[in-house]
Image (cartoon, rainbow, N blue to C red):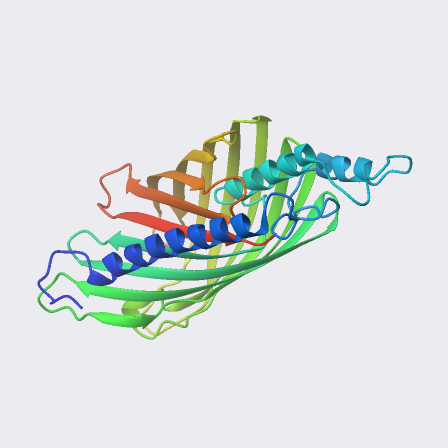
Amino acid sequence: MQSPTSRHPPSSFAVSVALVAVLAQGATVLLTSARAEEGPGTDALVPAPSATPASAPASAGSASAAAHAPGVEGAQTEESPAPKQAQQAQQAELDLRSIFDPTVVRRKVGIENELVNLEEIAWIDKTKLSGTFAIGPAQDFDVALRLLVPIACYASETPSGDDAFGLGDVEVTAGLVLRHASWFAHAAAFQVTFDTATDDSLGGNATVLKPFYVASVRPFSFLGAVLDAEYNVSVEEESGVGETRNLELDPSVNFTYPEEWLWFLAVEYKGKLDFENDDYTNRMQVSVGKVLGKTSNISVYFAVEFPLDDKTGQYSVKLGLTYFFD
């Protein structure tokens, strides 16, 4: 824990970054060793031909259906390497896109560390643990539920400020995804942020409801755009805390390179209209990420968010690791 006059990020940020790096390296080594021991003919870590990811496009199951069609000799007993490799590549691409596109939902768990600078007031370091459960009851329809639990550290930069460490505000999100074509999908979701922070400086001190809508367009395999519209409204505030009522519009453009590199670049504009304070702020976030191999279930990403106006000097950096379930 930093002293009140410190002007350096809290030491928990360095610990969290090191933890993410160690988890990524260790998980990669374990997966590589497991696959090496199983040999090239195993299906243990590869989805069955008939299994389709919850967020797979409508055409994703065509290869599987053909493999099990009547009249195809040996289709039900053995799968050739080519379809298996294609399926692995498709799953890796879906894992990659799910990092920045909310309309691509996957069953996953993750850890993210976010360091926020409050412009010479304080540093806030949040380690966010999340889990997402997703099912596809129909080929072009998905249902997802996510739980996010943050552990926060507040390091004051003012002589009279106090430091704090503990639980932040827990988030629960439920959403529906509908795909109309392989290049267009949209989603509607509802998020509740509960006032669970163990200290006033570690959360928003209010229970906030957030309905939001997301539309995703992908005209090319390497290029896509996402529009995220969110409305935040508080339903219960602690004493002395004002109401929350704002609209966020976050359009973004993303570039993916799924063939060999399995990495992405996303540029997102964040506009926020605050109805309570009659204010509008502009921010930008740039993210990069990578899936650690076509046969890996692990991805890492890094993001930087910064202001586009002089209303605030607040900025943040994020580093995250995600494990995807088959």
Q: Which of 217 and 113 is in front in this view?
A: 113
Indicate left or right for 12 with 27 as reference. Answer: left
Residue shown at 48%/40% (left/top)? 293
Indicate left or right for 86 with 225 as reference. Answer: right
Indicate left or right for 85 with 15 as reference. Answer: right
Can you tell which quarter of the image residue 6 is in? Answer: bottom left
Residue 312 position, x and y percent, is 23, 46
Residue shown at 52%/27% (left/top)? 222
Can you tell which quarter of the image residue 149 is in? Answer: bottom left
- Label total for image: 0
Residue 53 position, x and y percent, is 66, 47
- Relative height, residue 200 to residue 92 (above, below): below
- Relative height, residue 27 to residue 66 (above, below): below
Q: Nearer the viewer, residue 276 or 87?
A: 87
On-image quarter of the N terminus: bottom left
Residue 315 position, x and y percent, is 26, 46
Q: Residue furthest right?
A: 71
Do we see residue 225 in this rendering? yes
Indicate left or right for 120 with 165 as reference. Answer: left
Residue shown at 54%/45% (left/top)? 102
- Relative height, residue 71 to residue 234 (above, below): above
Q: Which of 170 and 43 is in front in this view?
A: 43
Q: Which of 164 and 210 is in front in this view?
A: 164
Q: Which residue lies furthest to the top in this view?
A: 220
Residue 163 position, x and y percent, is 19, 70
Do we see residue 113 in this rendering? no
